Image: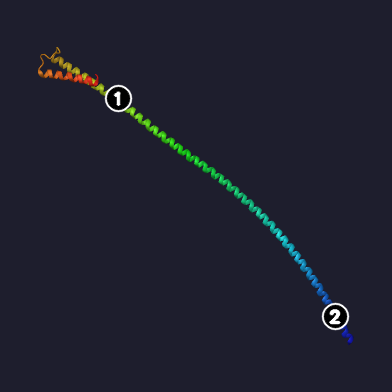
Amino acid sequence: MARISLEMEQYRWDTEERARQRTEKLKEVDWFLQDESQKRLQQWREKDNSSFRMQMELRIKDLEFQLSKKISQEDSIKAELEKYKQLHQEEVNTSLSLANQLDKITERLAEINSKRREKEMDTFFAKMEQEFHKSITRAQKEDAAKFEFESSIAAPLGSMDGLTPTQALLLKMSQEYAQILRKNYMI
């Protein structure tokens, strides 16, 4: 029995030794796997970080390009807006200039119309005056002819002899009237 117990003891010790060796090997394998796992995890992280960095760099470049495009568009819009402001200012200045010219032309036309009206009125009054003078002259001539005719009938010799005092007075007054008309109207 001692032998069995010695064999058992040996078997137990061998089993424990093998278990210890296996445990050691498992620990080594575990360390190796953990180390490999850490390495792979690190590689994945680095790869993932590298990929992420590349994606971020591409995204940044894309955003920078879009920003540059927007800035360029904004600059273009600002330049166009400035151009329109200048054109509008030129249009305002031109409108003001044209309005001033129109005012001057309107004033000048008013002056010309006023002068033309004055001339027309002067011409009208001159014609009216001529017509009036012609009428007066004609009336004077008619009156003078009528008076001379009546005088010749009343005093055939042209003297006041033989006239009644009323006829003499009428003759004298008509002669004075004829002189006044000649003097005033230069007949």
181 lies left or right of 71: left
Is disc 1 placed on a helix, strand or loop? Answer: helix
Q: Return the residue found at the far top.
A: 157
C-alpha span from label 2 to label 1: 162 Å
Q: Return the residue found at the far bottom.
A: 1
Q: Position of residue 42 (x, y in %)?
A: 74, 63
Give the residue drawn at x 14%, y 19%. 170
Q: Position of residue 103 (x, y in %)?
A: 41, 36
Is disc 2 placed on a helix, strand or loop? Answer: helix
| In this view, 99 is above or below 20 | above
Name the residue that disc number 1 marks: 126
Give the residue drawn at x 82%, y 76%. 20
Name the residue that disc number 2 marks: 13
178 lies left or right of 69: left
| In this view, 164 is above or below 92 | above
Q: Position of residue 179 (x, y in %)?
A: 20, 19
Q: Residue type at mark 2?
A: Trp
Q: Residue type at mark 1?
A: Ala
Callouts 2 and 1 close, C-beta under 8 Å: no
